Image (tube, rainbow, N blue to C red):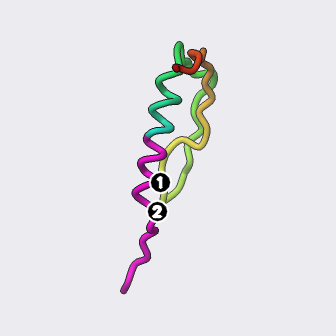
Amino acid sequence: MKRYVCLGLHIARIEIDAMLVEVLSRMEEVERTAPPEWLASNFISGPRTMPVKFRAWPRRG
């Protein structure tokens, strides 16, 4: 059985990593405002929502 692999998979991972590094580097004083709501699934497990509040630093450069 042949599997399809997206040709943009690797660049998408690099882009997501860069975005998360930038966003998380600007977040300060992160605190949860409500308990997380978990996704109940046999395929994917993780938080469906996790409300937080934070103060953002201004953009660098």
Q: Which residue: 60% across, 15% down?
A: 55
- Between marks 1 and 2, how big is the CA–CA gap? 6 Å
Q: Position of residue 60 (x, y in %)?
A: 52, 19
Residue 57 shown left or right of residue 2 in the figure: right
Which residue is under mark 1? 12
Q: Which residue: 42% across, 47% down?
A: 14
Q: Tell whether label 2 touches label 1 (CB within 8 Å).
A: yes
Q: Which residue: 59% across, 33% down?
A: 50
21, above or below 29, in the image: below
**Quadrant (top left/top right/bottom left/bottom right) for the N terminus:** bottom left
- Number of numbered callouts drawn: 2
Under mark 1, the amino acid is Ala
3, above or below 49, in the image: below
Residue 52 shown left or right of residue 25 in the figure: right
Which residue is under mark 2? 8
Q: Position of residue 34 (x, y in %)?
A: 63, 25
Nearer-the-camera pick, 31 or 25: 25
Q: Is residue 54 magenta?
A: no
- The range drawn in magenta is 1-17
